[in-house]
Image (cartoon, helix red, strand yellow):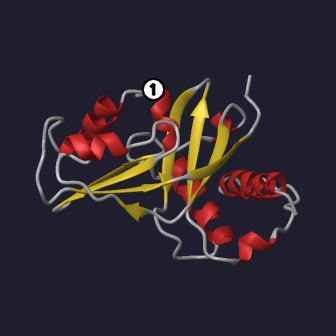
Amino acid sequence: MSTDALGTALLLRARNAIAAEFGEAPRPEPDHPALHAPGATFVTLTQHGELRGCIGSLEAWRLLDQDVRANAKAAAFRDPRFMPLTQNELAITRVEVSLLTPATPLCFASEEEAVAQLRPNIDGVILECAMHRGTFLPQVWESLPEPRRFMAHLKQKAGLPADFWSPDLKLSRYEVRKWKEPEKS
């Protein structure tokens, strides 16, 4: 079974999970073997190219089928940056699903070494330091293509100053396979 079949299965599950909250009948969902194994996803919702919600899992701790459904509902109704999605908005909302690879830690002695290891348009990055944690999917490189700016914004997302540095700072990277619904008009 192709990865396109997996993408179709994930996108349909994400949309059906959101639509079910409004009492809409689900569309038929094709099965795929990967759905029955642990998987980590992020579900991103956009309207007219603008972010409308994004929630996900950094680690595979539940079945992929369950993960994508839970993250779709969370992106639609529990992203703290947005009001819950309304039924009227559903028709103009585009769903994107990112399937994450396991994260691997980066080894570095300085911020310069850390930044030099980042691979624009490939790496998703997790930043951790004490109680602060944040991640950017690889798609964020599209709006922050310069590694230093990418890192500065990631620090801010984690609640740290853009110029923060500490020897206790940890970085991990992951890659994604992503699928998007066609553009909504």
Side of 56 where 19 appears, left or right: right
Q: Where is the C terminus found, in terms of image quarters?
A: top right
Q: Quadrant of residue 111?
A: top left
Side of 153 where 59 appears, left or right: right
Q: Nearer the viewer, residue 166 or 37?
A: 166
Q: Residue 76: x, y in percent?
A: 55, 48
Quick one: SS at disc 1? loop
The structure residue drawn at horizontal position 58% and vertical position 52%, both measured from the top left corner, is 176
Q: Residues within 10 Å of mark 1 (few under 14, many from 20)?
A: few
Q: Type of residue at label 1?
A: Ser
Image position of 139 with respect to 80: above or below: above
Q: Residue 29: x, y in percent?
A: 84, 61
Q: Which residue is mark 1?
A: 143
The structure residue drawn at horizontal position 46% and vertical position 48%, both measured from the top left corner, is 124
The structure residue drawn at horizontal position 33% and vertical position 58%, both measured from the top left corner, is 106
Image position of 92 with respect to 32: above or below: above
Q: Where is the N terminus found, in terms of image quarters?
A: bottom right
Total count of labels:
1
Side of 87 where 140 appears, left or right: left
Image position of 151 with respect to 4: above or below: above
Q: Residue 26: x, y in percent?
A: 81, 57
Q: Residue 149: x, y in percent?
A: 30, 29
Q: Nearer the viewer, residue 101 or 91?
A: 101
The structure residue drawn at horizontal position 29% and vertical position 38%, both measured from the top left corner, is 151
Side of 105 where 41 appears, left or right: right
Q: Nearer the viewer, residue 81 or 157?
A: 157
